Amino acid sequence: MSLLQEIWPVSKSLDTPALLAYLIGERFPGRTIVTASLKASSIVVLKMVADADPATPVLFCQPGFDFEESKTYRAEITEQLGLSNVELTAGHETEVRDGDVDHMERMLVEYENSASRSFELVHLNESLQGFDCWISAVGHVERRPGIKHRVDVEGRLIRVDPIIHWSEQDVQEFMRDNNLPYHKRAKRKHTKFKPTEISDAPYYSF
């Protein structure tokens, strides 16, 4: 029986917070890492991770320029959730180890002086070494539209997309119920603006 076959029956019986607590505290203690962005869906996962164990390693993926608003928001979320093991990466780790695959996050990046957006690949091969379980929280629906299971195998890792089946409304309700703030840029999506106000706003990678 493979490791995934052992975990699947348990994962199917647990809700998302319980699943993360099981993986972090029981199945892979000290061997679990979380990749995160500053999107609301990512903050939802970080809240559950912090409730399970705030010392869980968290790797914020930040390609391109790190805006002051993003720095401030990241520090605010880290303090509010009590996360104590946080690092930042631009994701230039493209070398794939023997016997493994290229582990990456796909992020939508927006720029300060342009209204255009683009996807960038954040390669994480070096950062994920030393871990057996990878909780991916950067952006589930946009990045992995064909994924059906919360728990799967990617190369040598157990990869977890905790809220792959959550709707935007589910995310918003969780943010509200847990009094979690939005990134300044993301918050604009939940407020009505005139088109000119939106086009004049700065853009951020989160």
Image (cartoon, rainbow, N blue to C red):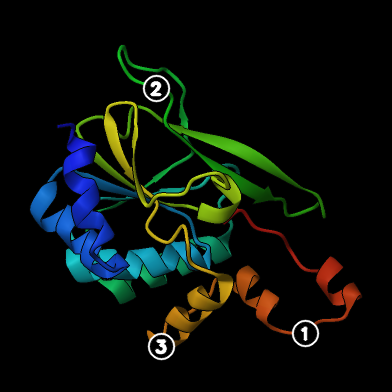
**Residue at position x 24%, y 48% in the image:** 8
Type of the residue with mark 3: Asp
| Residue 61 x/y as whole percent | 46, 46
Type of the residue with mark 2: Val
Q: CA distance from mark 1 to mark 3?
A: 22 Å
Question: Is the C-beta separation of discs 1 and 3 under 8 Å?
Answer: no
Rendered position, 134 above or below 56: above
- Point out the frontmost of discs 1 and 3: 3
Q: CA distance from mark 1 to mark 2?
A: 43 Å
Point out the residue furthest to the right here.
Answer: 196
**Along the line of sight, the residue nearer the viewer: 156 or 117:** 156
* Residue density around tag 3, few if under 14, some if 14–19, many if 20 or more, within 10 Å: few
Question: Is the C-beta separation of discs 3 and 2 under 8 Å?
Answer: no
* Residue density around tag 2, few if under 14, some if 14–19, many if 20 or more, within 10 Å: some
Q: Which residue is mark 2?
A: 101
Q: Is residue 118 left or right of residue 75?
A: right
**Secondary element type, mark 1:** loop
From this viewpoint, is residue 169 visible?
yes
**Along the line of sight, the residue nearer the viewer: 13 or 101:** 13
Query: Mark 3 or mark 1, which is nearer the start of the sequence?
Result: 3
**Residue at position x 23%, y 63% in the image:** 13
Q: Is residue 74 left or right of residue 66?
A: left
Q: Is residue 200 left or right of residue 158?
A: right
Query: Mark 2 or mark 1, which is nearer the start of the sequence?
Result: 2
Locate the N terminus by quadrant.
top left
Q: Which mark is residue 177?
A: 3
Q: Which residue is mark 1?
A: 192
